[in-house]
Image: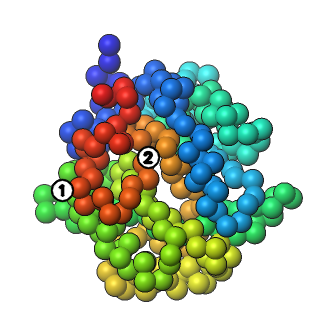
């Protein structure tokens, strides 16, 4: 049976969203996490280099396997793995609350040869008619909280940003990240963009009123949530979504992003 004290988030979340237990993380990564879909994902990368993965075991949830107590809040890089099933086996060992990949592309000698361009839209950056601004939420120690209204607003914002980005790029993928959305750019030409070019685009979009996380777009934060992994703070699967169906996508109830332990 679920221990309610264990999974009750410190942050207010939409109905049904809650921390996943260790058992649920194990069940998810053992039975649902499909690395063959990741092959497809990284096939779209124009530069083919070894991909680095990363996990955070229990920084926000404080739920972690006892043996990893010391490293529960650390970002652990997984860059030594035989193949994707081996990477999955390592994740099953850590049972993390969050899994990521590194958008940097490395060559065989570990030198950075490019970076995937991505945009991050999170609900906390929007001003909610009920819960106010991020500053308001921080004052209530609810900086990571979000509600269904904000979730809907961030979805509409993602659709608008996608429309804008379509004017510039041809290969866009939208991912529901568990809290908000990511837009990934797979256009070959963007992988070798310099920081200056990334910053320039981020500035234009911010001037146009888009509430993107500049830190992600310019590459300061190079880790991004791993598609098909579990977001352990909200118990949702990180799910690529076709932008044409995005308007009707509701992460609170949509089966596409509900891990089986919630069915
Ligand atoms: Zn709200």
Mark 1 crowd level (few <14, some 14–19, many ≥20, 10 Å Cα):
some
Query: Label 1's element?
Result: helix
Q: Is 81 placed left or right of 228 in the picture?
A: right
Query: Label 2's element?
Result: loop
Mark 2 crowd level (few <14, some 14–19, many ≥20, 10 Å Cα):
many
In front here: 23 or 192?
192
Q: Furthest-right residue in view?
A: 109
Compared to residue 195, the image places residue 263 above or below, namely above
In front here: 66 or 40?
40
The image position of residue 48, as x and y in percent, is: 73, 60
Q: Earlier in the sequence, mark 1 or mark 2?
A: 1
The disc at residue 160 is: none
Q: Residue at x 65, y 29 (%)?
A: 89
Name the quadrant containing residue 197. bottom right
The image position of residue 43, as x and y in percent, is: 64, 57
Confirm if mark 1 falls within 8 A of ligand 1. Answer: yes
Q: Furthest-top residue in view?
A: 1
In front here: 184 or 220?
184
The image position of residue 32, as x and y in percent, is: 48, 31
Q: Are marks 1 and 2 in contact (CB under 8 Å)?
A: no
Q: Residue under circle 1?
A: 149
Q: Residue at x 42, y 61 (%)?
A: 174
Compared to residue 29, the image places residue 238 above or below, namely below
Q: Is 170 placed left or right of 112 in the picture?
A: left
Q: Furthest-left residue in view?
A: 130
Q: Residue under circle 2?
A: 238
Image quadrant occupied by the C terminus: top left
Image quadrant occupied by the N terminus: top left
């Amino acid at each position: 049976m679920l221990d309610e004290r264990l999974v009750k988030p410190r942050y207010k979340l939409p109905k049904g969203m809650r921390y996943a237990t260790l058992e649920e993380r194990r069940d998810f990564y053992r039975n649902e996490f499909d690395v063959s879909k990741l092959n497809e994902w990284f096939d779209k990368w124009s530069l083919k280099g070894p991909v680095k993965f990363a996990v955070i075991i229990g920084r926000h949830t404080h739920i972690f396997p006892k043996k990893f107590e010391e490293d529960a809040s650390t970002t652990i890089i997984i860059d030594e793995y035989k193949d994707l099933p081996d990477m999955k086996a390592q994740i099953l060992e850590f049972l993390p609350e969050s899994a990521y990949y590194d958008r940097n592309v490395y060559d065989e000698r570990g030198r950075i040869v490019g970076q995937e361009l991505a945009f991050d839209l999170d609900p906390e950056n929007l001003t909610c008619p009920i819960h106010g601004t991020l500053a308001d939420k921080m004052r209530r120690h609810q900086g990571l909280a979000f509600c269904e209204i904000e979730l809907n607003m961030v979805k509409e914002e993602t659709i608008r940003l996608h429309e804008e980005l379509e004017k510039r790029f041809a290969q866009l993928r939208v991912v529901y990240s568990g809290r908000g959305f990511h837009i990934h750019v797979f256009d070959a030409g963007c992988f070798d963009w310099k920081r200056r070019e990334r910053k320039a685009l981020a500035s234009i979009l911010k001037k146009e009123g888009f509430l993107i996380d500049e830190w992600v777009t310019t590459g300061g934060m190079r880790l991004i949530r791993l598609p098909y992994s579990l977001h352990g703070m909200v118990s949702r699967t990180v799910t690529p979504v076709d932008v044409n169906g995005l308007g009707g996508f509701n992460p609170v109830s949509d089966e596409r992003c509900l891990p089986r332990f919630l069915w």
